[in-house]
Image (cartoon, rainbow, N blue to C red):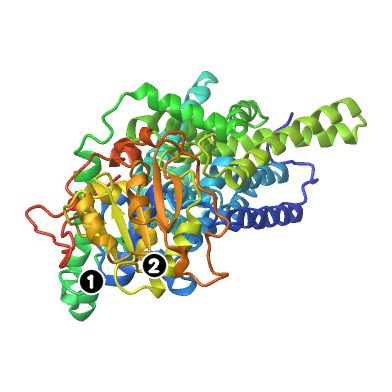
Amino acid sequence: MAVGPSTDGTDDRRLAVGGVLVLSVVALVARFLDLGGRVAHWDEGRVAWWILDYAESGEFSYRPIIHGPFYEIVTPLVFDVFGATDATLRYVPALLTGLVPLSVLLLRDRFDTEELLALAFFLALNPLLLYYGRFMRGDPLVGAFMFVAFLLFVRFVGTRSLRYLFAGVVFVALGFTVKENAPVYVLCWLGGVAVYGYLRLFAARTHGETPIRAWLARRRDRLVGPDWPSPQADGGVRASLNARDLGGRLLYGLGVAVICLVLFFAVIVLFYAPRGASGVTVGTTLADPLQFPALVEEATVGSFESFMSIWINSEKTDHAYLPYLVHLVETMGAGALVVGLLAVVGFLLDSVREGGPRPVVVVAFLWGVASLLGYPIITDIKAPWAAVNVVLPLTIPAAVALGAFVRWGRRARASDDLASYGLAALVVVLLVSVPTYTAYQTSFVDPQADSNDLVQYAQPAADIHPEMAALELLAERNEGTDVVIYGSSLVDGKSIYQRPSCTGSSGWFNSLPLPWYLERADAETACAEDLGDLRRLAEERPPVVVSTADQRSTLEAQFSDYTVTVRTMRSYGSRWVFLVDTSRLPEGENPMADVESEVLVDDATEGAVDGSMTQADASGGAASNGTATGATVTAAAAVRPPTPSAIHYG
C-alpha cells in the first residue's frame, strides 16, 4: 500500500477541503449537542466557582493549583452573553476543540486527500477527544493549541512564510496559558526532531554520504559564491558584499526572533497579569503606566515562581510509575484503540515509503510514544483526560494508515479486484465505525456512568439537574436561608473565602460540584455541623437541605413534608440526600415532578465515607489549608486568599 501524496494528479484538493469542512462541522455539532446534559464534574465545579468569583469581584491572580488562567479570563465573557449554565461552561473547549480538524489543511502539501480526511475524522470523532472536548478541563484545550501550533510550524518549514511561524508562536503561548504541561509538548517536539535528525544522519553515513558537510557547503556557496574561493578576490569587493549579506541575514534572523519573543510574552502577560483594584494589576497599571515593568514581572517571574512552588517543588507526582502507565494504556484501549494500533501501522508504512519517511509523521509518532511513557511520571492522579495528550500526536501516523487502506480499496476497485476491494472496504468500515460508535456511547449514552472507562471518579453518576433547577427557582422566591448543608462530612466548621464559606475547607471540596450550582443560583446557604445546629435552622424552614445519605432518617424527621431524593455524587459509592420543599413551587413549575430517587439497599452502609472525599480522591492534590497563612477568615467578612499557594486543590 503506497503512502504519501499522490504524484499521478488524481488527488482532488477541492474534495479534501470540502471533506475537512464537513468533518469540522460534524466535530462542532458533536461537541455542542446536549452539551449541558452531563452534571458538572468535581473539577469543573471547582474551576467554575473561581470563574464566577472573578466575574463578580473583578479580582484575579494566577492559581497554579487550578492550572492556567485561560478559562478564568475567557469564560466570563461567555457567561456575560449566554448566562452561566453547565452548557455555557463548556462552550469554550467545545468550540476550540471542534475547530481543530480545520488545521489539517496545513498539511495539504505533505498529505494526500485520504490522509487529510482520515486525520480530520480522528480529530473530530475519536472517543477520548470528543468526550473531553465536551469537558471544561485544561488537557483538551492545551492539546488543541499545541497541536495546531505544531502543524503551523510544519507549514512554516515547508513554505518559509513567517505568518505561519508567528501564528505558531501565538498558539504555543495560548497553550502555556491553559495548563502547565505545555512545555512538555515543546520538549517532545524537540526530542522528536533530534531523533529524526540522528536517524537521517545515521542512514546517510551508511551510504557514504556526509549530509552535514554538504549542508555547510551549500550555506557557504549562498554567502560567498562558488566562483569566489578567495576572500581577497576582486580586491575584496565581493567579500565585503558577502559580509554585508551575512550581517543582514543575522539581523533579519534576530529581528524574527525578537518578534516571536514579543508575541509570546504579550500573550503570557495578557492572561497571567493580575486583575483587581489594588496592588500591581492591569487596572492599576492602566491608571499608572509606570507600573508596567512590575506588572510584566508579576505575570512572568511571579507566575513561574508560583508554578514551581506548587508543581515542581512538591510531592504531587511522587508515586509509583507502573500503575499510572497501566491506567494510561487501559484508557487508550478504551477510548483510542483504533488510533493507537493504526499509529504503529502508519509509522511503519511511512518508514518504507518511496522517498523516505516524512519528518512530520516520524516526529508525531515519537511525540506520541514519549507522551505515553512520560505522562505517568508527571501526572498527579490516574485520570483519563491525560490520554488526550497521547492521542493527539498519534492521530497523524494513524491517518497515514487509514489513508493507505482507503487507497488500497480505490485501486482495487479501479483494477476490478473485487476481493481486495471488499476486504479493504470492510477494514475501512470497521476502522471508522468502531470509534464512532464508541464516541456515541461514551459521550451521549453513558457520559456519567461508572461503566464508562472515560469517566473520572469525581464525576457524579446521578443527574442532579432537577434538584438544582428546583433550587434555583426556590432561591428566587425565598427570603432568608435558601439551602442548608448538614453533616460533618460536608461541614468542618472553619470558614474560608470560597462560598459557601461555612462548609470549611474540607467540606467545600467534599461538596463539589455543589458550590458551583449554589453560586450561580445566588443561593443563601447555611451550614449545620451537628443536630443542634440543624434543629435551629429547621425553624426557618429552608427550602433545600443537602447531606450525605446516612443522615436521611434524621433529616426526614425534621422535614417530613419535603420531597426526598438520593443521588450518587461520584462515579460510585458516594451518595447524598436532597430534601426539597416542592410545595412552594407553582403547579407546572416543579422540575422534580417526575424524578425518582435512587434505591438504597441499606442506609446504614452509607456512613461517613459516603460524603467524605479528600482532594486527593477527586484530583490527586494533597490537602492543604484553604485560607491564607496567618489570616483569620469569618463567614461574615471573608478575606480573599492573597497568595496562590493558599488556594485549595483537588
Q: Which residue is at a point 59% across and 29% down the rendered structure image?
A: 347
> Is disc 2 placed on a helix, strand or loop?
helix
Residue at numbered disc 1: 276
Q: Specify few, some or many for label 1: CA neighbours under 10 Å numbering under 14, 14-19, or 20 or more.
A: some
Q: Looking at the rendered structure, which numbered label has been put on residue 325? A: none
Q: Specify few, some or many for label 2: CA neighbours under 10 Å numbering under 14, 14-19, or 20 or more.
A: some
Q: Which residue is at a point 50% across and 32% down the rendered structure image?
A: 331
Which of the marked residues, 2 or 1, is nearer the chain's N terminus? 1
Q: Residue 266, can we see it?
A: yes
Q: CA distance from mark 2 to mark 1?
A: 24 Å
Q: Amino acid at mark 2?
A: Ala
Residue at numbered disc 2: 521
> Is disc 1 placed on a helix, strand or loop?
loop
The answer to whether residue 299 is above or below residue 319 is below
Q: Residue 243, can we see it?
A: no
Residue furthest to the left in view is: 630
Q: Which residue is at a point 15% across and 60% down the rendered structure image?
A: 642
User: Which one is nearer the viewer's eye here, 47 or 509?
Assistant: 509
